[in-house]
Image: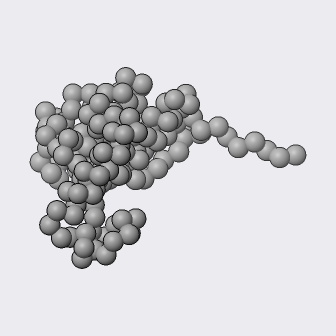
Amino acid sequence: MVKKANKVKKMMLILSKATLDNVYACFILANGARMEGIESEIFFTFFGLEAIQKEKLDHLHIATVGNPAMHIPSIVGGLPGVEAMATKMMKSKIEELDIPPIGEFLEILTASGTKLWACKLAMDMFDLEDNDLIEDIDGVLTVGDFYERAEGEGTHVVFI
């Protein structure tokens, strides 16, 4: 007899980099979970905090240097204007596919019940205050607090 796998009940996503591609991957996974009736939470740590900083979330870029998925040599990716061009192209494609901009996507996520958490250590490391973050943030957690929230059967942790 084949035993059925346990159903996914909660997705705990850790966002460590606020490149446009990583942020959208994280948000799409969180939103997809909510659409399937699965709880979702995002823990923003290190440079991932830029995705929830009021002054930075509308200015995220694609990383063109050292990104093998770009299929261009790093030396070309570092030339002036290449990152801006790649970012503009991706934003254009995102808009064409009717995927919301970052700020709007954050509103959709919170409205759907996705919990958004900032990392305490990263906040301290970058001298950030609560008022630097969007209003919809659910709070600031330590890593231990995050792991406590991840307890339970059917919880999956994904690092992006």
Residue 102 drawn at (x, y percent): 28, 38
- Asked if 82 appears above or below 21 in the picture, the reply is below
Residue 151 appears left or right of 74? right
Towards the viewer: 131 or 90: 90
* In the image, farthest residue toward the top: 111
Relative side of 148 to 82, left or right:
right
Locate residue 53, reporting x and y percent. Answer: 19, 40
Q: Position of residue 134 (x, y in %)?
A: 21, 32
Locate residue 128 relative to residue 154 in the image: left or right.
Answer: left
Would residue 149 be visible to someone looking at this image? Answer: no
Residue at x 56% of width, y 31% of height: 36
* Residue occupying the point 26% across, 43% down: 51
Residue 101 visible at all: yes
Residue 131, given in percent of the width and then of the height, sits at 13, 33
Q: Residue at x 49, y 30 (%)?
A: 34
The total of numbered circles placed on residues is: 0
- The coloring applied to the image is one colour
Q: Which is nearer the eye, 61 or 147?
A: 61
**Along the viewing direction, whichever of 138 and 18 lies nearer the viewer:** 18
User: Which residue does the image show at 75% across and 42% down from the upper left?
Assistant: 4
Is 136 on the left-hand or right-hand side of 59?
right
